[in-house]
Amino acid sequence: MRILITGVCGFVGSTLARALAQSGAGHTLSGLDNFIRPGSESNRAELRRLGVRLFHGDLRAASDLETLPPVDWVIDAAANPSVLAGVDGRTSTRQLVEHNLAGTINLLEFCKQHRAGFTLLSTSRVYSIAPLAALAVTVADRAFRPVADTTLLPAGLSAAGVAETFPTLAPVSLYGATKLASETLALEYGETFGLPVFLNRCGVLAGAGQFGRADQGIFAFWINACLRRRPLKYIGFDGQGHQVRDCLHPRDLLPLLEKQFAAPKLPAADRIVNVSGSTASAMSLRQLSDWCAARFGPHTVGSDAAPRPFDIPWMVLDSTKAARIWGWQPQTPVAAILDEIAAHAAAHPDWLDLSAPL
């Protein structure tokens, strides 16, 4: 199969490109990247060595897609992935919309032209913030968890996590809105032009080589910062780092993607699934600090209980539907993900500086 990966030199795109190239399936791989993400250049040489044909282009410019070769499938891993994008002073709202929505439109037109399938790597941030921010939680083992009384939980959320039935009404953040709009357009293009389309809503993606930034790669950022004794601070809620996220290694997406490549036509509702490490991988910042202290020695973390925009105390995706439809389960346990990040951090002492915002 001829496959195009956008954002191919980012963490997720490059990880998937490596996994596909090394799978033995014989795929012909092309990748598009605009290289504006600090650190992305570091992946170029290895991907070329693996036989990935790289193109320098920007999804915001439709003409940049005109010279790409015909493909059978597109995996869209290109986006500004920060929930603070457009409001943090580093990215304008127009840039956010152009990257995450206009870029998707250009890709869907490309798929229409070449009769190609389309997989959008979407996000847990399409789910409504208000009920998640107001979630009734308790603290156990230095981490938030939903209260045991299920009558106090919003519809679509259980101890297993947030399901696909959870509301997606605004507000979801500007970032979440661009991804949700992209999902809708992708399904419409698929139905209108007979294209296979799949929407995989990912939890926090993490692993070695992730560009460490607090707003986009929190596990890599935290581990690198603890190892290097960089200043850290628990922000928001009780200021104790009890907020929880799950994590998933992006290479664990490969078995799901391979099944989607060969799938028959499915109802639109079955084309949307959560993919995450679920509760088995979920941990709080405080628990991550404890892990780092055991690995690297103690490191003092500050505290600031002032709230941040769009923050929520407990965000864990329920991937039961992906298991039911696709027989999919994550393969890399959280301990292995953290070990991998730590080993990479030890081998790359300048990683935070390499991947820091310009």
Image (cartoon, helix red, strand yellow):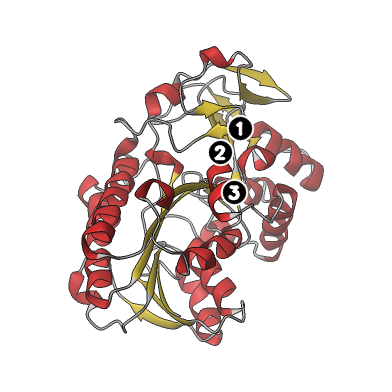
- Please state which amino acid type lies under the numbered disc 1: Ala
Q: SS for tag 2?
A: loop
> Which sits in the foreground, 84 or 120?
120
Q: Point out residue 253 in the picture as x, y percentages from the top left corner.
A: 56, 60
Q: Which residue is mark 3?
A: 323
Q: Nearer the viewer, residue 288 or 300?
A: 288
Disc 1 is placed on an element classified as loop
Measured Cα–Cα span from mark 3 to mark 2: 10 Å
Please name the residue that numbered disc 2 is placed on. Answer: 318
Residue 260: x percent and y percent? 48, 63
Q: Are marks 3 and 1 in contact (CB under 8 Å)?
A: no
| Of pointers 3 and 1, the one earlier in the residue sequence | 1
Query: Residue at 58% of width from left, 29% of height from top?
Result: 243
* Mark 3 burial class by Cα count in 10 Å: few <14, some 14-19, many 20+: some
How many numbered marks appear? Answer: 3
- Neighbor class of circle 1 (other Cα within 10 Å; few <14, some 14-19, many 20+) is some
Q: Quadrant of the C terminus?
A: bottom left
What residue is pinned by disc 1? Answer: 160
